[in-house]
Image (cartoon, coloured by chain):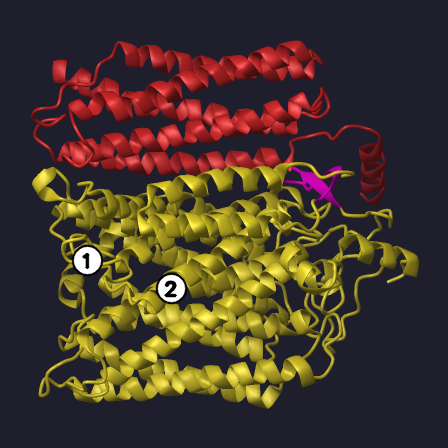
Chain colours: A yellow, B red
């Protein structure tokens, strides 16, 4: 860094937050947003994990009597909702918020305030859904919430209202985040970052952001209809009034299948990011991998009926969706072969991120193979609603997605904290988790094939379910232990790990071109990109030492050093510089609007028209305050 | 390219910004996802229709096509008035900017007012939202669109207040043009809503 101290000071003054609690509440820094998403998602992972362990304890043997059936229903509902909506998607938002701007050489997201707003809404929606534990109305109709089970007649009380209003509220956060990621990638790429130089992780986020824009409206409309049915006695799902309960299932799974790929794609994109770094060569088939991710995003909208094979739909319909479910294997296979070829042609080093990435590959493979099995209508008719399906999707969600996220966490941990983790403990954590996840979910395949159904609080003795269930319960404890080892390693290394330096892995993408952790303004000078791996520019393979120097000043050419709170906008697929724009600074408005939305959710929960109208009025005022220009700006 | 960037930085400080704003792309993507929202709820409308022997069900008259057509024309004409408002602003004609903005707000208020009047006063004599799935969908879709019109009016009121305090000009029109994209979207959605809820049932019933 050859910029003068005064420039750095001026940049720090322009981009830093004010100290103390006010700075904490008004910050819009994308790195702070990312860190908050990460910590909050980890807390929800812990809560969802405890729920899972309670359920596994209940299933340790036949008729164990640890939980009542009512408690079991509440736990599997909250476990599914927590893991799908409050852990996996936000954990990916964490990485995307922190690293997407860094990877494309930008100083912030396109809409910094909207970004912090997304976080606050996610936090409050999560708390709102968990508030049922305090009031005693825990949602218990399943995270899939099928009618008529969740209508007033069979679910009296407010339990499913917490669910329906909470997910509508949360969808706002996810959608705002998706728009932000897309506009940031369209417009804030460093000059020279053409579409073929966009890092593959960013492509993964672009793919899921488009999926969110097309999938989440369905999961706004459906819970809205559910809530209107419950609160205002509307009849969408009531066959006696011309409605149809299957309409819910179509709307739910039109969102519910893409959401699986929304969770999986960033995880595979992380693997595609990590493998080149630890095999010391460029990703084989970059364009194919990107095309495969976009194809997966597209095809995933044609799969939803495979969740409804036993719902009594016409055979032509189920055949079509069965065929599409098989087609989606092709792009996944392309990614696999690209990874294998990269490892084959490179010189792999087995650092901890690489171990987790390999774990992700193996678990993805197993879950993918059982996915092909349940895509076949005759097989699914037998396996539907059994623990075989539980085993299948947990290999993908608890296996591939979690391992991909942990691969990313270990990979980017030095950038997040400036420290390195402990090699031995990291290995112990990996192997414990890996054994645990397999010991938990592999035996459930057999339990399912032998006929053990899901979502039932216990099972009878003498049906052969005892051994697989005992193994699965022991496995779940090992799984939990492994994650605790990981947590301990990360927490200890955060304070005590050795200094990492800017680029400890010798990686090639731009987030490693700045210090660890990055300064408030990310980059003192805007990078100019001439290569897909800018820090490897001019080299086909980096040198072995791992001591890759930062690219020379010529490679990262300069922008005038006095860019205050400014970012450069670029245009078109070539990333040509176009204009300079001053970004909005810290503001309390995002927090304020999120709080008003929480009030609106509570008003809807209480079914108070006056309170709803009051909240809407406050919403208009607070959003107005958000946009109203401040003096002197 | 370093020189090109330096040049851009210099020029940006001296001249108004070139190219599309960030807000433009943001509101376009908002319109995409909101468009899907309406597509989904219209899917629910047609799905339910396909499973019902008579549409509208027994005891509910076909939607009338007289006054509803007038309301539709009034709403759609605001796309033109918004366009005229933007053009006046770019030409620096503040008087016309004011005039077209007020025309837009007035037409929108007429559309929303007649909608609310039908919702609370006219139709309850004929059917309530809790009568059957048809009525539930009818009112959910129309109120959802009405809510979008209301949001759009709040946005235009914000623009009105800002205009009154001397904001905006030929080089400072991002807020106005962003608001107008959203407004064209709300108008465009009405074409699909009107065709699905009013025109098609009439067409097929008489066909």
Q: Indicate the position of residue A17 as horizontal and vertical percent values.
A: 73, 58
Residue B147 occupies quadrant: top left
- Residue at position x 72%, y 29% in the image: B18
Q: Secondary structure at mark 2?
A: loop
Report the residue that reaches farthest toward the front: A610
| Left or right: A194 as drawn, with respect to A319 | right
The residue nearer to you, when weighing A268 against A83, is A83
Give me the chain letter of mark 1: A
Q: Is A526 above or below relative to B98?
A: below
Is residue A171 visible in the rendered structure shown here?
A: no
- Residue at position x 48%, y 23% in the image: B184
Residue A575 occupies quadrant: top right
- Residue at position x 48%, y 84% in the image: A484
- Compare marks 2 and 1 and give the one earlier in the sequence: 2
Question: Which quadrant, please, contains the C terminus of chain A?
Answer: top right
Q: Indicate the position of residue B136 as horizontal and vertical percent values.
A: 21, 35
Q: Is B105 above or below relative to B147?
A: above
Q: Secondary structure at mark 1?
A: loop
Which residue is the site of mark 1?
A156
Mark 1 surroundings within 10 Å by alpha-carbon count, few (fewer than 14), some (14 through 19), many (20 or more): few
The residue nearer to you, when weighing B137 against B4, is B137
Which residue is the site of mark 2?
A131
| Left or right: A321 as drawn, with respect to A276 | left
| Left or right: A38 as drawn, with respect to A133 | right
Asked if residue A277 is among those painted magenta in the image, a careful observer would answer no
Q: Which residues are magenta?
A: A566-583
Question: Are the residues flagged by discs 2 and 1 in contact, CB closer than 8 Å?
Answer: no
Q: Is A406 above or below relative to A189?
A: below
Q: Indicate the position of residue B100 as horizontal and vertical percent values.
A: 56, 12
Distance in Å between CA atoms under marks 2 and 1: 17 Å
């Amino acid at each position: 860094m050859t910029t003068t101290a005064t420039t750095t000071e001026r940049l720090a003054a322009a981009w830093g937050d004010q100290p103390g609690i006010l700075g904490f509440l008004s910050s819009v820094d994308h790195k702070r947003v990312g860190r908050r998403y990460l910590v909050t998602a980890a807390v929800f992972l812990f809560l969802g994990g405890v729920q899972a362990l309670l359920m596994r304890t209940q299933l340790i043997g036949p008729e164990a009597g640890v939980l009542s059936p009512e408690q079991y229903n509440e736990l599997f509902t909250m476990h599914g909702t927590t893991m799908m909506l409050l852990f996996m998607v936000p954990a990916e938002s964490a990485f995307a918020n922190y690293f997407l701007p860094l990877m494309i050489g930008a100083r912030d997201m396109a809409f910094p305030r909207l970004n912090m707003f997304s976080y606050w809404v996610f936090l409050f929606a999560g708390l709102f859904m968990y508030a049922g534990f305090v009031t005693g109305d825990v949602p218990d109709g399943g995270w899939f919430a099928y009618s008529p089970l969740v209508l007033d007649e069979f679910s009296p009380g407010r339990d499913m209202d917490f669910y329906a209003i909470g997910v509508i509220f949360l969808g706002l956060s996810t959608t705002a985040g998706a728009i932000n990621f897309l506009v940031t990638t369209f417009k804030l790429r460093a000059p020279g970052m053409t579409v073929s130089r966009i890092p593959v992780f960013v492509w993964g986020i672009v793919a899921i952001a488009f999926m969110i824009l097309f999938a989440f409206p369905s999961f706004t409309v459906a819970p809205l209809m559910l809530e209107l049915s419950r609160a205002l006695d509307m009849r969408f799902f009531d066959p006696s009034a011309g409605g149809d309960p299957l309409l819910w299932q179509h709307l739910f799974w039109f969102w519910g299948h893409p959401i699986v790929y929304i969770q999986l794609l960033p995880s595979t994109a992380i693997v595609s990011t990590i493998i080149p770094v630890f095999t010391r060569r460029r990703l084989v088939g970059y364009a194919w991998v990107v095309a495969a991710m976009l194809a997966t995003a597209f095809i995933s909208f044609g799969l939803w009926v495979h969740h409804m094979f036993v719902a009594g739909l016409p055979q032509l319909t189920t055949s079509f969706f069965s065929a599409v479910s098989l087609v989606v294997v092709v792009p996944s296979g392309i990614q696999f072969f690209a990874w294998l070829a990269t490892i084959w042609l490179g010189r792999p080093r087995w650092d901890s991120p690489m171990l987790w990435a390999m774990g992700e590959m193996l678990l993805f493979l197993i879950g993918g193979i059982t996915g092909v099995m349940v895509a076949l209508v005759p097989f699914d008719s037998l396996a539907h609603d059994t623990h075989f399906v539980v085993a299948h999707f947990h290999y993908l969600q608890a296996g591939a997605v979690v391992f991909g996220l942990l691969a990313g966490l270990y990979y980017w941990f030095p950038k997040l904290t400036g420290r390195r983790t402990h090699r031995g403990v990291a290995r112990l954590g990996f192997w414990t988790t890996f054994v645990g996840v397999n010991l938990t979910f592999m035996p459930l395949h057999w339990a399912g094939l032998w006929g053990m159904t899901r979502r039932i609080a216990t099972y009878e003795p003498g049906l052969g379910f005892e051994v697989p269930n005992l193994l699965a319960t022991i496995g779940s404890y090992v799984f939990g232990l492994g994650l605790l080892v990981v947590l301990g390693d990360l927490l200890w290394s955060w304070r005590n790990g050795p200094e990492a330096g800017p680029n400890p892995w010798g990686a090639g993408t731009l987030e490693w071109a700045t210090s660890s952790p990055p300064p408030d303004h990310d980059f003192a000078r805007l990078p100019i990109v001439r290569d897909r791996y800018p820090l490897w520019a001019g080299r086909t393979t980096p040198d072995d030492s791992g001591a890759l120097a930062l690219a020379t000043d010529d490679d990262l050419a300069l922008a005038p050093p006095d860019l205050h709170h400014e970012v450069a906008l670029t245009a078109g697929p070539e990333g040509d510089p176009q204009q300079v724009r001053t970004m909005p600074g810290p503001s309390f408005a995002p927090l304020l609007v999120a709080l008003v939305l929480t009030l609106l959710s509570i008003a809807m929960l209480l079914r108070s028209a006056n309170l709803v109208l009051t909240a809407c009025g406050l919403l208009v005022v607070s959003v107005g305050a958000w946009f109203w220009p401040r003096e002197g700006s | 390219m370093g020189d090109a960037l330096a040049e851009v930085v210099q020029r940006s400080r001296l001249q108004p910004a070139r190219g599309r704003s960030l807000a433009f792309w943001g509101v376009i993507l908002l319109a995409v996802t909101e468009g899907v929202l309406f597509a989904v709820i219209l899917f629910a409308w047609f799905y339910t229709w396909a499973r019902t022997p008579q549409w509208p069900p027994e005891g509910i008259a076909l939607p009338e096509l007289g006054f509803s057509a007038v309301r539709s024309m009034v709403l759609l004409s605001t796309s033109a008035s918004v366009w005229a408002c933007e053009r006046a602003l770019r030409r620096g004609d503040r008087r016309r900017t004011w005039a077209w903005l007020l025309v837009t707000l007035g037409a929108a208020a007429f559309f929303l007012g007649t909608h609310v009047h039908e919702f609370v006063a006219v139709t309850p004599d004929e059917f309530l939202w809790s009568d059957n799935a048809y009525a539930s969908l009818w009112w959910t879709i129309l109120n959802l669109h009405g809510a979008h019109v209301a949001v759009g009016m709040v946005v235009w009121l914000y623009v009105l207040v800002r205009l009154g305090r001397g904001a905006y000009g030929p080089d400072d029109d991002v807020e106005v043009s962003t608001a107008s994209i959203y407004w064209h979207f709300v108008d465009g959605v009405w074409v699909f809503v009107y065709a699905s809820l009013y025109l098609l049932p009439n067409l097929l019933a008489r066909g």
